[in-house]
Image: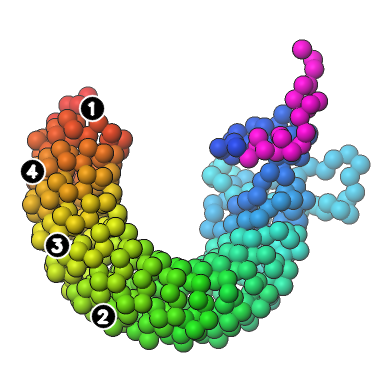
Amino acid sequence: MRGHDRINTFLPDELILEVFTHLDSKASRDSCSLVCKRWLALERLSRTTLRIGASGTPDIFLRLLARRFLCVKAIHIDEHLSVSLPVQPRRRRGSDRSTLPYHKLHYFGEKSGYEDSETEPYFLSDAALSSIGEEFPQLERLSLIWCSNVSCSGLTSLASSCDSLKSLDLQGCYVGDQGLSAVGKYCKLLEDLNLRFCEGLTDLGLVELAQGCRKSLKSLGVAACAKITDVSLESVGAHCKSLETLSLDSEFMHNKGVVAVAQGCPALKILKLRCVNVTDEALMTVGTSCLSLELLALYSFQQFTDKGLHAVGKGCKKLKNLTLSDCYFLTDNGLEAIATGCAELTHLEVNGCHNIGTLGLESIGRSCRCLTELTLSYCQKIGNNALQEVGRGCKFLQALYLVDCSGVGDDAICSITSGCRNLKKLHIRRCYGIGNKGIIAVGEFCKSLTDLSLRFCNRSWVIWQWLS
């Protein structure tokens, strides 16, 4: 009946909260919060994630957020977020000035064109980091991106209060060993740790964290940390038996550290390496020890040869995702070993590996029947026959990305389209051998295609006729 609020009268808080959890966008949730005061309070209770930028007065800012959002479990703070109009919150009538002091809050979003020359510098302080631990007791995930003013003191205080923390990202934070040691001491449930551009860390901090989180740590990422060496990885291999993901980008890692993790972490499923001083010895150990490996990504290796891939193909039968980027000494022989041994492969990316050609990819087409995504970039030696074999053998292929493959022409595209009827994504760039014949075949056979991109394919003028 008109004038009666049947929803608020009959529905309990729990049911309305359940409805809010099924809303698929922030805009929808924001709209619901404007209906009435009850819905505003309930919608705040349903929010579990905050994404904010650091402010000039972060301690007050975070306390205000804690009052409004009581069930937050994940906080993402990024000091690189752009700045929009600073606003001053209004006081309600009768409010106690001592509980809500005058201050500025800086909300981050698209620039509004307004600039305040008197605004304070935007940074997260140790005081604010401490308040996160005090004000958000249920916190499980914390991401601090380029928060360069936080130190060991703030991280130690946070760790002592957040014993439920499961994920910590410290990209670009100049925290030292003492802070990381405190995380290992207090956060016994930590599963995911990302250290990228953390210049203040050494082996001491990571070793103590590995010892403290030995039963829980499942994912570790280290990049551009000059003082973290094989010593840290040896400790991880010795203590963290549940480790499933390892991502390394370092000039200071050698075989010793990678071998220690491969031998000590039998549950390893994801391995990403960009380490110029790691050789076949490490990859051969991965092949013999990491039998549960599902994803392997190798970037810019100058010392890997086909020996390492032979070991992976022989031992890692569960491998599903393989990325080879700028590995100049890998050849068709190594890719054939992967195709023969890893029949469950679903994703393959070959980027700038100039000695991998048609024969290697032909073996993938013959053996890897489950392949769903294929990316070939700067592969000048791969010709039409390779993709013709993929078209005949990989019937489940859904995505194909071709970049600067001069040996690929219309015959290859015709074979792919006629054989891979489930193709949904096709991106082609600077493949000058592909013309109208190939593109017409795409339109004729790929009825499930939802994403098509053609760039610098000068012979494919027919597409413009379709679009017009």
Q: Secondary structure at mark 1?
A: helix
Count residues near mark 3 (Cα–Cα under 10 Å), then give few for <14, some for 14-19, many for 20+: many
Label 2–label 3 contact, CB within 8 A? no
Disc 4 to disc 1, C-alpha distance: 23 Å
**Mark 2 surroundings: few (<14), some (14-19) or many (≥20) residues within 10 A:** some
Which quadrant: the C terminus? top left
Q: Which residue is mark 2?
A: 280
Q: Which residue is mark 1?
A: 467
Could you tell me which secondary element the residue under label 4 belongs to?
helix
Callout 1–callout 2 Cβ contact below 8 Å: no
Residue 178 occupies quadrant: bottom right
* Structural distance between the alpha carbons of marks 1 and 3: 37 Å
**Residue type (three-letter) at the residue carrying disc 2:** Asp
Per the image, label 3 sits on a secondary structure element best described as helix
Magenta stretch, residue numbers? 1-21
The answer to if 19 sits in the magenta stretch is yes
Q: Quadrant of residue 300?
A: bottom left
Quickly name the residue at label 3: 360
Q: Earlier in the sequence, mark 1 or mark 2?
A: 2
Between label 1 and label 3, give the one nearer the viewer: 3
- On residue 411, which mark appears? 4
Cα–Cα gap, marks 1 and 2:
50 Å
Q: Are marks 4 and 3 in contact (CB under 8 Å)?
A: no
Please tell me which of labels 4 and 3 falls first in the chain.
3
Give the camera-side residue of 426 and 34: 426
Query: Eyeballing the image, is 325 above or below 111?
Result: below
Q: Provide the secondary structure element on which disc 2 rests.
A: helix
